[in-house]
Amino acid sequence: MASTQFIAFSVVTIILPTLTMAVEHIVGDDKGWNANFNNTTWASGKVFRVGDTLVFKYQPPHNLYTRWMETALRTV
């Protein structure tokens, strides 16, 4: 019985801090993410850890495939 409680306590003390330290990063900060976005510059001042989440906020319509097709059709 004591070993089961010890294992449960160990799991909680290892996993719980990891979950509470996770951060949500909004890609592009207040400007959001777009096709001309420089992700290297944006990420240079940030620290990313396991469990963090990247959120991509963008203005519609945002479809990279459509943009690629428009560019391809213009060159024909």
Image: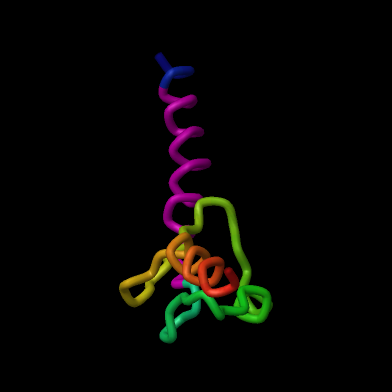
What residue appears at the point 38 percent right and 72 percent down from the top-left corner?
57
Q: Position of residue 31 (x, y in %)?
A: 43, 85
Q: Position of residue 24 (x, y in %)?
A: 43, 65
In this picture, residue 21 sits left or right of residue 38: left
Asked if the magenta segment contains residue 19, the reply would be yes
Nearer the observer, 55 or 22? 55
Q: Which residue is most to the front?
A: 76
Q: How was this image coloured?
A: rainbow
What residue appears at the point 56 percent right and 66 percent down from the top-left corner?
72
Nearer the observer, 50 or 64? 64
Q: Which residue is most to the bottom?
A: 31
Q: Quadrant of the C terminus?
A: bottom right
Task: Determine the main secondary structure of the stretch shown in magenta.
Answer: helix
In this picture, residue 60 sits left or right of residue 22: left
Nearer the observer, 36 or 39? 36
Magenta residues span 5-26
Q: Quadrant of the N terminus?
A: top left
In this picture, residue 5 sits left or right of residue 71: left
Q: Which residue is most to the top?
A: 1
What residue appears at the point 61 percent right and 74 percent down from the top-left corner?
39
